[in-house]
Image: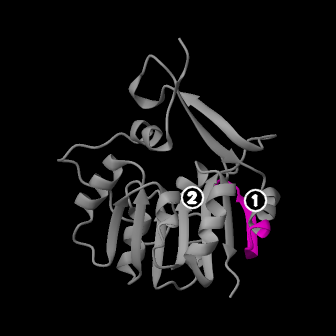
């Protein structure tokens, strides 16, 4: 039986299953988390935005944190289940909205530019940077920040990598999605080629120095 391909949205709906109507979200942390809780930098990576865009917010915790700090924040997710849940959980948070859309389609739609666009183990991991980065450059205000985090790249991984598994619910057939992996210097080169400046790309070691590290990348649109 051939493996069954899945879109990023279908992957996350499987890996992070939709929760029932009665379940409440976990408390939002008192800091912005790019990686392991309490580890690494926080919201300061984004500067001091007035408007921010979250690419693939899932449960929406990072977006909620920013909105509670007075940042007008929008989360865009390709998963209808994730968006419905986030809207239901956080409907009373001022300055926060969640949209159901493909991130590239949304960025290409001509929405007003953002001061910061970010992805925390989200859509930037599942999207071809040759498609995503030009759209981001046009969707940021001058001097605006783009930042993302994801798992550190596997040794020798370069470009789109298939990720397979039965995940959490014991499926009989594996699911396959593509994740874009590059070493930090390759991400920096890609961003520079698409006109970004002030680029920082590095791997944060896991807190216990034995677990999986986190790739953290930050860049700016020229002022």
- Residue positioned 69% across, 42% down in the render: 160
Q: Which residue is mark 2?
A: 35
Q: Is residue 204 above or below residue 78?
A: below
Q: Which segment did they paint magenta?
A: 192-206
Residue 177 seen: yes
Q: Is residue 25 left or right of residue 157?
A: left
Q: Give the number of marks.
A: 2
Cα–Cα gap, marks 2 and 1:
18 Å
Kindly indicate whether the residue at mark 1 contacts the one at mark 2 (C-beta within 8 angstroms).
Answer: no
Toward the front, the furthest residue is: 109
Using residue 175 as the reference point, say whether residue 83 is left or right of it. Answer: left
**Residue at (72%, 46%) from the top-left corner?**
153
Residue located beneath label 1 in the image: 187
The percent coordinates of residue 135 (x first, y second) are 60, 66
Q: Secondary structure at mark 1?
A: helix
| Secondary structure type for disc 2 | loop
The one nearer the camera, 33 or 195, is: 195
Q: With respect to residue 163, does 97 lie above or below?
A: below
Residue 222 placement: quadrant: bottom right
Q: How is the image coloured?
A: one colour
Q: Quadrant of residue 214?
A: bottom right
Q: Kindly identify the residue that appears in the image at 42 percent across and 61 percent down.
A: 76
Which residue corresponds to the image point at 63% horizontal and 43% vertical from the top-left? 179
The correct choice, above or below, for 140 with respect to 20 in the image is below
Tell me where residue 205 appears, x and y as whole percent: 70, 55
User: Residue 175: horizontal and vertical position, in percent?
Assistant: 51, 28
Vertical arrangement, residue 138 with respect to residue 26, above or below: below
Q: Is residue 86 magenta?
A: no
Residue 34 appears at what percent x and percent y?
56, 62
138 relative position to 37: left or right: right
């Amino acid at each position: 039986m051939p493996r069954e391909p899945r879109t990023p949205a279908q992957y996350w709906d499987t890996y992070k299953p939709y929760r029932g109507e009665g379940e409440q979200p976990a408390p939002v942390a008192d800091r912005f988390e790019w990686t392991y809780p309490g580890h690494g930098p926080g919201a300061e990576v984004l500067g001091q935005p007035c408007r921010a865009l979250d690419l693939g917010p899932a449960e929406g915790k990072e977006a909620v944190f920013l909105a509670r700090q007075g940042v007008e924040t929008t989360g865009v997710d390709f998963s209808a289940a994730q968006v419905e849940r986030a809207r239901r959980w956080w409907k009373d948070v001022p300055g926060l909205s969640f949209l159901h859309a493909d991130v590239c389609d949304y960025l290409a739609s001509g929405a007003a530019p953002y001061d910061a666009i970010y992805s925390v183990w989200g859509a930037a991991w599942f999207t071809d940077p040759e498609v995503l980065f030009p759209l981001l450059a046009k969707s940021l205000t001058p001097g605006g920040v783009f930042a993302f985090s994801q798992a550190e790249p596997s040794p020798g991984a370069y470009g789109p990598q298939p990720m397979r598994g039965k995940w959490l619910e014991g499926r009989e057939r594996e699911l396959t999605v593509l994740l874009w992996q590059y070493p930090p210097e390759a991400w920096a080169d890609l961003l520079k080629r698409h006109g970004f400046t002030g680029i920082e790309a590095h791997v944060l070691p896991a807190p216990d120095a034995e677990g999986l590290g986190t790739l953290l990348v930050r860049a700016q649109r020229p002022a």
